[in-house]
Image (spheres, rainbow, N blue to C red):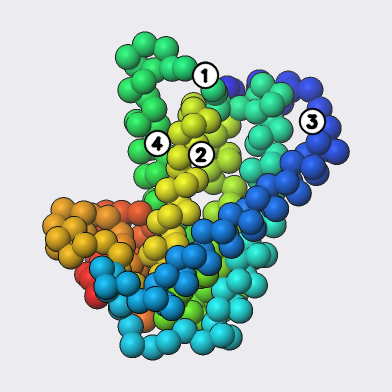
Amino acid sequence: MSLGDLFNLAPIPLSGTVITYLGFTAIIIARYFAIVWPIHFTLWKRAPKKARRLSKREPTRETIRNEIYLSTISAFIYALPAAIVVEIWKAGGSAMYSGMPEGVLGWLWLPVSGLIYLFVQDTWFYFTHRVMHHRKLFQHTHAGHHRSVQPTPWASFSFDPIEAVSSAWLLPVLALILPIHVGMALLILMLMTINSVFNHAGWEVYPDRWIKGWWGRHIITASHHNLHHTKFKGNYGLYFRFWDKVCGTDRGLV
């Protein structure tokens, strides 16, 4: 869609947007607890043999409370742009679409659009994340997240409010201009959740052969991101090690 099409949309009912917003907020919070609690319990209480613990330090209750507190605030922030874009989509003004893809190009666009979205998100996250580590900005934008020197799965969405605002709008706005199937959008949200939870788990759940092979060299896992929390510098990426390697901030693996 064009900007002109967006401006020519009929007014979106405020009541519908509020209902959608509250619904999204509830869903995000419920999903957070439903996914994080069993993973945290399995890793930190049961210590599975197939996972590798990355730190000897036990997370404190204070750390976990802070992670849950910030994650709950982030849910309210992330829900707003998502609700607005869904209402725009319902009014026919979004680049999101549904139904069966048409032809070979339609099916091919599914994975291509997904990769574009992931790369754009990864790029935005890398550079904003790195900026927030500047000494003049860190305390106001990112310090809350880094109270988790040894993160747990509860830290997966424990963003400071400014950080949450800086990232919450990206995918919804992108969905206004770059066509993406609703199913692929949901898949990206699922991948984003799984990636964030396991990268903050404090345990490496992927097999060593993956970590030492192609996957570990290019894809960020807990072994890579845990160093960011313990060293505070480097390893700024979200999904891929690409920008860390290009910009000289890759610190390797735990």
Position in image of residue 195 (x %, y %): 40, 56
Q: Check if mark 4's residue and mark 1's residue have beta carbons within 8 Å.
A: no
In space, the residues marked 3 and 4 are separated at their CA atoms by: 28 Å
Counting residues from the start of the chain, the first of labels 4 and 1 encountered is 1
Which amino acid type corresponds to the residue marked 3 in the rendered image?
Ile
**Residue 8, how many percent across, how many down?**
73, 21
Write down the residue under mark 4: 114
Q: Closer to the camera: disc 3 or disc 1?
A: 1
Q: Is residue 135 above or below residue 74?
A: below
> How far is the residue under mark 4 from the one under mark 1?
17 Å
**Residue shown at 67% from the left, 65% from the top:** 73
Marks 3/1 in contact by CB < 8 Å: the verdict is no
Residue 57, percent across and down?
38, 88
Mark 3 / mark 2, whichever is N-terminal: 3
Which quadrant would the N terminus be assigned to in this image?
top right
Kindly identify which residue carries mark 1.
99
